Image (cartoon, rainbow, N blue to C red):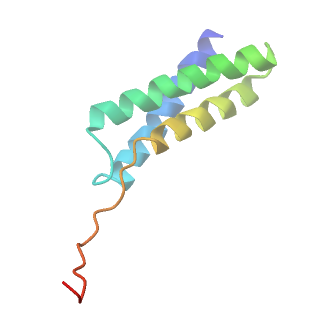
Amino acid sequence: MFLEALGSALLGLALAWAAVHRLPDRLPARGVVLTTGSLGAVFGALVTHGALGPGHALATLIGAIAIAAVLLSLLIRPAARRLRRSAAA
């Protein structure tokens, strides 16, 4: 279980790092994103390991990445839009 947790934390950190470099203007501070990715992946590994039981290391890592991606997607802010003025105003 320890190696699954460590592996999932590293995968979550890698996923968060990719998100920070891909969408820097739509995410909050880098530390928040990296922490959310890592802790989300560890939480996902814990939930998946609890649901499947021991002996499913690959499925546990896939579940960890899925939950980390969902948590990271909740941090994304909408893109900045231009204000449009109506012709009637």
**As rendered, which of 81 and 17 lies closer to the eye?**
81
User: Does the image show residue 7?
Assistant: no
Q: Is residue 2 left or right of residue 50?
A: left
Q: Measured along the vertical axis of the image, is residue 49 above or below residue 58?
A: above
- Classify the position of the C terminus by image quarter: bottom left
* Circle count: 0
Task: Report the residue at 30% width, 51% height from top.
Answer: 24
Q: x and y percent of residue 77 in the render?
A: 36, 51
Taking the spot 33% from the left edge, 46% from the top edge, the residue there is: 27
The spot of residue 38 in percent (x, y) is 46, 27
Instruction: Give the quarter of the image for residue 2.
Output: top right
Q: Residue at x 56, y 20 (%)?
A: 43
The residue furthest top is: 2
Q: Quadrant of the N terminus?
A: top right
- Vertical order, 50 against 15 (above or below): above
**Is 43 displayed left or right of 86 in the figure?**
right
Position of residue 49 measured from the top left corner of the image (x, y, whole percent): 72, 17
Q: Residue at x 50, y 32 (%)?
A: 12
Residue at the front extreme? 88
The spot of residue 55 in percent (x, y) is: 81, 16
Residue 54 in which image quadrant:
top right
When the figure is inspected, residue 62 is found, relative to residue 89, above or below; the finding is above
